[in-house]
Image (cartoon, grey):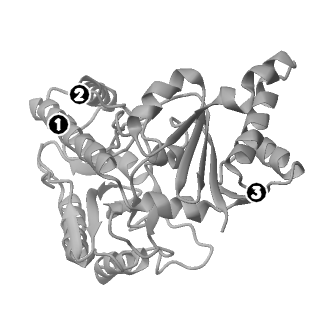
Amino acid sequence: MPDVLIFADTVRSPELRHEVPLATPDPMIYIERDGTRHVYAASLELPLLEEIGGLEVIPNEVLGLDDLIAEGYGFHEIDRELVLRACQHAGTEYVVVPRSFPLEAADHLRSNGIDVRADGEVFDRKRRQKTEAELEGIRRAVHVSERAYDRAREVLRDDRGVSSEDLRAEISRTLTDAGMRTPDIVIVSHGKQTAVGHEPGHGRIERGEPIVIDLYPQDPDSGCYSDMTRTLCVGEPPARLVEYQRLCVEVLERIRPAIRAGVTGAELFGLACDVFEREGFPTQRTKEPGEVLEEGFYHSLGHGVGLEIHELPLLGRTGQELVAGDVVAVEPGLYAKDFGGCCLEDLMLVTEDGCEVLTEYPYDLEP
């Protein structure tokens, strides 16, 4: 059996952050061999690494860091040589690495007799079942998202003429004040913009048009995200939006009791398509091969959430089997280019015999 090797930092690598629950921008070397978890790191990281427990922490000096510097090795030459020496120190000759493993380091290992194989699925499986610390981080991010929605609804209730930019600033301030990392894109779209996927939104929000707010802040302590979407409307919502919202709620109510370990994301996606197709809306299931769907239920039902905002399992045409410990974002939506759309998104924790809904927030269109 191959050993596990990761060479990365915990800020950019979800694979390493799962194994080493510590935020650090400097790279370290992680090796799993014969049940032992080795971490080779710079001296300034050692005290915090030793507090984690369950890790054999080894300073880079043991690998001859000082000698490499004295011999004139360059910055990146030192990195790849340390990875090789860590493998030799741990006694490994055959390793699996994540998809993002540096090609330069892999070439150096192979040229020195180490068999390196990229196998992203190994690391996907390791991260599917969330740790308690990861779940707590997701819950914190969910609660703060709900506070941000409360603030957005407050602002909209004032009905004094607000723009997407104004509302985005209020939401971002709420997330930041609560200690969350604000996502690069805080989606506050309105009107026809809401039918465009990942449109951030811009301009003055008018009465009677859909407003889609999609938030996915990151909890800095765990590195985990939440993901939540609600659709609102200032004033009397048009009948079309009311119907879209009713069908999205129906999908969520059908999906909730169907989620459990063993069901596939494709099966859940099919349940959502059943609802929308019954009412005559196109879905990815009914479109022609090669057709680009821009209206109706044009996206998948959702995805996993954790150390990445989009991760396995997928809830779509190729959706995988769910396992206990998965956290999934379920996000049915309906859209029309000449009108806009409605999307509702909840997070759910998969259990052996069901699910726990992590998002407890109303679906009301009224602010």
* Picture quadrant where residue 272 is located: bottom left
- CA gap between label 2 and label 1 equals 9 Å
> Can residue 232 be seen in this snapshot?
yes
> What residue type is disc 2 on?
Ala
> What residue type is disc 3 on?
Glu
Q: Where's residue 51, x and y in %?
A: 39, 33
Q: Nearer the viewer, residue 320 or 353?
A: 353
- Residue beneath the point at 36% across and 38% down: 218
Contact? badges 2 and 1 (CB < 8 Å): yes
Q: Quadrant of the N terminus?
A: bottom right
The residue indicated by pointer 2 is 178
The label shown at residue 270 is: none
> What residue type is disc 1 on?
Arg
Q: Quadrant of the C terminus?
A: top left
Compared across the picture, whether 250 is left or right of 101 comes to left
Q: Where's residue 29, x and y in %?
A: 63, 40
- Residue beneath the point at 44% across and 43% down: 199
Say if 42 sits above or below 14 in the image: above
Question: Label 1 crowding class (10 Å Cα cut-off): few <14, some 14-19, many 20+?
Answer: some
Q: Earlier in the sequence, mark 1 or mark 3?
A: 3
Q: Secondary structure at mark 3?
A: loop
The residue indicated by pointer 3 is 93
The label shown at residue 147 is: 1
Q: Nearer the viewer, residue 317 or 114?
A: 114
